[in-house]
Amino acid sequence: MKAIVTIGNGGYEQLRPRVVPLPTPASGEVLVQVLAAGVNNTEINTRVGWYSSSVKTGTEDAATAEDLQADTRTDGGWNEATPFPFIQGTDCCGRIAAVGPDGNPAAIGTRVLVRPCIRTSGFMSWDNIWMGSDFDGAFAQFVKVPVGEVFPVHCDWSDAQLATIPCAYGTAENMVHRAQVAQGDQVLVTGASGGVGSAAVQLAKRRGARVTAITTKEKTEQVLAIGAHQVIARDADCLACLGKNTMDVVIDNVAGPAFGDLLEVLKRGGRYVSSGAIGGPLVSLDMRTFYLKDLLLIGCTAWDEPIFPQLISYIEQGQLQPLVAKTLPLERIMDAQQEFLEKKHVGNFVLIPPPLEG
């Protein structure tokens, strides 16, 4: 099969188009033909080794650094060492093409979404691995996954629309779920035009929250259209605009210099939840703000058990709006990631693998 193989940490030269062996599903596995694969920050972060403690800058700065070298960082992946060379791709909409020896042949042909976050020791353990970061993913014509991680979905969405869902919406729903967003909550979402941010806006509103979003002025109307009640410009003073003690929940994947102000806008007992730090991983924390306001700081990586089934139900009930910023052929992955990093889009980029020969 055709695939994009990432051979190590470094720049775009590490992304290599190759013909690789077709995976064979073992017992408890299925082979999925990839129909569409989303593009996320995590693939770029993994390629450049951003998860390493040696990296001090935000995602964009790390990915575009002129001195970026092919220097493998042993702690640069989600679970420290990344298994180079391997196939990235965390988002997959596909069709079951084959099943393992003990599988159900009736499943062949079913259109599915793949849950990329796998709780290897069950949901009572925090152990987790990720498709496209810890093992081969969807930047290929086929991907092999455990049968328990494929979810049939019945809707009229296109393959590209479905491919925007797994990582971004799963991550956002996990944060909304963990922060216990509820009817009437005042919720602030940073980075609201990105994949996770735009998903968080929709998912928080779905629960009856009043959503304030932070994005660029140029994207204000698009973010309002997906459910934000008000929008604050990214370059504005968030604390001055909102005031202290005004938000019940902050959903933040930006971090960076604004972190301290985000805690100040929280009410007493407020919840701050994060699954990323694209604006910079190192922040300044005044512990007095944290403990005197009885704040709850929630980190989110491993997805809870209800998250993915809930997303499938939201799709099938017409409660989500897919946001496809652009589709490109898989072989143009470099163009997709370059444009993705420009952050001029709203929603997600999607890659389409080449058609099967014969």
Image (tube, rainbow, N blue to C red):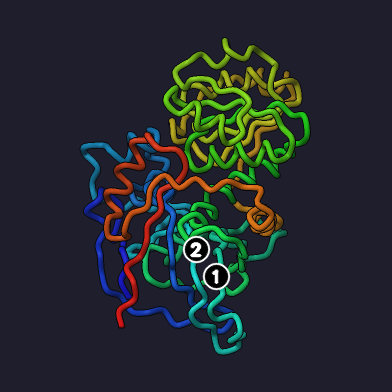
**Label located before the other in sequence (2 or 1):** 2
Q: Is residue 304 visible?
A: no
User: Where residue 353 sits: x, y (%)?
Assistant: 35, 65
Give the residue drawn at x 43%, y 61%: 36
Residue 111 numbered mark, or none? 1
Give the residue drawn at x 38%, y 40%: 54
Residue type at mark 2?
A: Cys
Image quarter in which the N terminus is found: bottom left
Nearest the eye: 235 or 193: 193
**Horizontally, is 179 left or right of 260 in the view?**
right
Occupied quadrant, residue 260: top right
Residue 93 numbered mark, or none? 2
**Horizontally, is 119 left or right of 280 in the view?**
right
Occupied quadrant, residue 308: bottom right
Identify the secondary structure beneath mark 1.
strand
Q: Are marks 2 and 1 in contact (CB under 8 Å)?
A: yes
